[in-house]
Amino acid sequence: MSTGGSTGGWAARNPAAAVERESVAWPHRHLLGLEELSPDEIRLILDTADGFEDVSTRSVKKVPALRGRVVVNLFFEDSTRTKTSFILAAQRLSADVVDFSAKTSSLSKGESIRDTVRNIEAMGVDLLIVRHNVAGTPHLIAKNVNCCVINAGDGRHEHPTQGLLDIYTMRQVKKNIEGLKVAIVGDVANSRVARSNLHGLVKLGADVTFVGPTTLVPRAFEKMGARIAHDFDKVIHEFDVINMLRIQSERISSNVFPSLQEYSRLFGLSAERMKRAKPDVLIMHPGPINRGIEMSADVADGANSAILKQVTNGLAVRMAVMFLCKQAAGA
Ligand code: CP
């Protein structure tokens, strides 16, 4: 098994061989979360993604790794980045891709999710990519099908491929995850991205701090390995990476801060607040951004921002995840 700690190593120079070697060690048919992966398994995905990275820069953006396979996107919740990224990643692996529309499906006639996925699988599907607003739905689906299931975000629980692409981007820019000081700022309580980042980063030896108001960053996260801070200005100078989160109003039912302006004044990332940060701090955001709330436009588009790099890297990471899971499932 690969234990490579940084990008640009053997895997990057020998992508085809790396993928072949590393796929032997990957045991999981499904990717449901980063909590259940070992540090070596996370590194294996990152190293395999290294091998796929250059496919997206070729004039013909395709490799035959999943030729003849069928990938179905089952998104029960809206998405721009994740859905498009999985579609393109599957196409770049030469798979056939179906985009299932939950809103126009027979779910509206009372069909259960279990029956829906079993009927879809009966058409010869190899991988199901699942997003749902209820935590645990991808796990439920995985128990009811024989094909691979990849969690594309379940409620507040996990968004493992977002966590992986965030860590991949940090490793690409900062070279090593071990010892990296990472802040995850904002609506941590409602964020599956924060949970997946925390699980993955802590396993790889990073030092993670959750920053935000007490209502959105409860002390309970300390038990999961995060340090907690409520005064952003006091700690901002410490971090190598700052990952900003959106206020997930779709999951918030009561008032958790006095006003958006007040939230932005205390926890938003502005050019003024950036003066307190390390000059080479890496600024990240999973998207979608609410400009002017969690960060200003000049920071989002500034020299320290890796936000579009994250989106680009999502393709290689998702290619790696689909490839490894399908290899583990067998022919
Ligand atoms: N980062 C993310 O999950 O974005 P989407 O909701 O647009 O997929």
Image: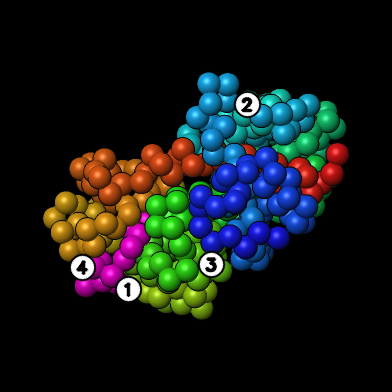
- The answer to whether residue 242 is visible is yes
For marks 3 and 1, the one nearer the N-term is: 3
Callout 2: 10 Å neighbours few (<14), some, many (20+)? some
Q: Amino acid at mark 2?
A: Lys
The residue identified by callout 4 is 233
**Separation (CA) of disc 3 from disc 1:** 22 Å
In the image shown, does 32 or 165 lie closer to the viewer? 165
Mark 2 secondary-structure assignment: loop
Pinpoint residue 40: horizontal percent, then vertical percent: 64, 63
Q: What residue appears at the point 54 percent right and 39 percent down from the top-left corner?
A: 53
> Which numbered circle lies on residue 62?
2
Cβ–Cβ below 8 Å for labels 1 and 2? no
Pinpoint residue 72: horizontal percent, then vertical percent: 69, 32
Q: Amino acid at mark 4?
A: Asp
**Separation (CA) of disc 3 from disc 2:** 31 Å
Disc 4 Cβ-to-ligand 1 distance below 8 Å: no
The residue identified by callout 3 is 204
The residue identified by callout 1 is 229
**Separation (CA) of disc 2 from disc 4:** 46 Å
Range shown magenta: 230-246
